[in-house]
Amino acid sequence: MIKNSLKLTTCLVVTALFAGSAYAADTYGPFPVTVKGYDGDKTSSVSYSGQVARHVLHDSLKKLAGKGDGGGNAAELEAQMLSYFNGSDQDLPIIAPVSKDGFPVKQTTLKEISAGKNIAGKFYDGAMPAWPGGMTGKEVVLHMISQAARTEGGYDPVNGYDYAQLISKFTMGAMPYNQAVDNYLDGKLDAGVKPNGEPYKDGAYYSGKEHVWDEAFGYFGAAAHSLTLSAEDNYNIAKMKDLGTADANGDGVIDLKSEYVFGPAYYAAAADKSGKTAYLPTIMQAFIDGRELIASAEGKNLTGEQRAQLQGYAKVIADNWEMVLAEAAFKYAGSVYKDIAGITEASDDAARAEAFRKYVKHWGELKGFAMALQSGKNNLGKTAVHLNRLIGYGPVTLDGTFVSGLDADGNFEKNRKMSWNSYQLHMLRVQELLAESFGIEARANDATAELAGLVDSLSGDGGAETD
Ligand SMILES: [Ca+2]
Ligand SMILES: [Ca+2]
């Protein structure tokens, strides 16, 4: 790493030197064209528009998951959702993110970003035991899409599902996280795969390793200038609240290809807003350092030492990204815990229904992030088994039942019951398990201090679980 090789004593000198260095980026790109034999007019080798298109397909799919009218438009809506999931020959309109007052977005169709992209081909398709039915990851999300299309507004109050949340949070793990940590930052860094001494493909203006690294960065979903911004600024860009900080080139519109903050980076910023973590800058810095390292090889194959260094940056990215997902799951377990009090203390049916809706939304986020965590490179082993058992296939619903499986036709069965207090205890156990397994640091909505008291109160009511 260049910074470590400098033996300088004052920050002032370091800053001055880096300001004039070719390798002193604080933004992801531009980086020089280094690939041998390229004679076109490109001046930067950075390219990750395909990943941006996939984030947009995901955001659009999430939006569509809430468009059901209760059954009447089920077939049409499912087909529409599948066109975003599977991709389409048509130029699909961007459904999200779209311009809003004070935050104009440059692109309005997918082809303006990158043509021919889909989610399906990049979706984790290993075992996904967190969902009933013994399905693969891709089968699970297709089941969710089909169910979502039959609901009103993506909300299934009987089984306690909020499909926009479930689909979105699961996808955030199963597509970008999986592709980055288990593919581009993993096997594609091997010496014999996409070597740096060759173009990524014939005629490309980027080398094999340059593009592999760019694709991983694209999946993280940060703006190219995210490292220059605070956690709050990055968070606000994702919320489409701050044109000034988002519009890096000052042309008055937000280019989704470089100026917007998508899901994974947004959740990193969300944790960092606590002031206790620095996931987003740590990940961004590792991406930039890795890209500078590749550029410094000047179109030649990486040495063993360079590749080892690059794998070191990859590990920093993968470890911190996993933490971001674990922090989010921790936060929403705390929300679900609190929401249960809102349900049980509601003064009338209307207030109870409202509290239950909020609880189902937060549960969908918890469940989706728990599934995202299980979609990466690491086999979480018994942590995953315990997490899935504590959270369940579905949340405890208003009649005390919860989803226990799927029948032969793929419909949900609810053959088990649990008390609200017992399920609250489960949520605290989820927080405890995540804290112990991952070393959670932001600890949003931490309710673990209430664990001992809840265990005491439950010891008098006949045990934690009922059937
Ligand atoms: Ca792999
Ligand atoms: Ca702009």
Image: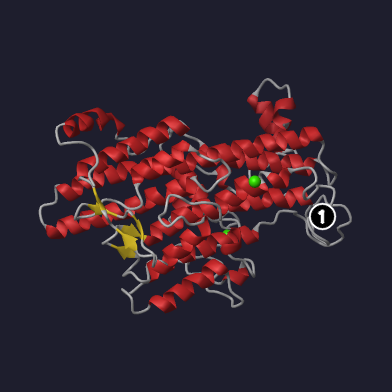
The residue at the point 53 percent across, 65 percent down is 57
* Residue 20 drawn at (x, y percent): 74, 38
The residue at the point 70 percent across, 39 percent down is 24
Q: Which residue is mark 1?
A: 199
The residue at the point 28 percent across, 29 percent down is 449
**Residue farthest along the front direction in this orientation:** 408
* Residue 251 drawn at (x, y percent): 58, 62
**Residue 175 higher or lower than 453, as above or below:** below
Label 1 amino acid?
Pro
CB of residue at label 1: within 8 Å of ligand 1? no
Q: Answer yes or no: is residue 256 visible.
A: no
**Relative to residue 375, is residue 421 drawn left or right?**
left
* Residue 71 drawn at (x, y percent): 33, 76
Give 338 or 461, whichever is nearer the viewer: 461
**Relative to residue 48, is residue 451 drawn left or right?**
left
Q: Answer yes or no: is residue 63 visible.
A: yes
* Residue 59 drawn at (x, y percent): 48, 62
**Relative to residue 71, is residue 234 drawn left or right?**
right
Give 380 or 205, whichever is nearer the viewer: 380
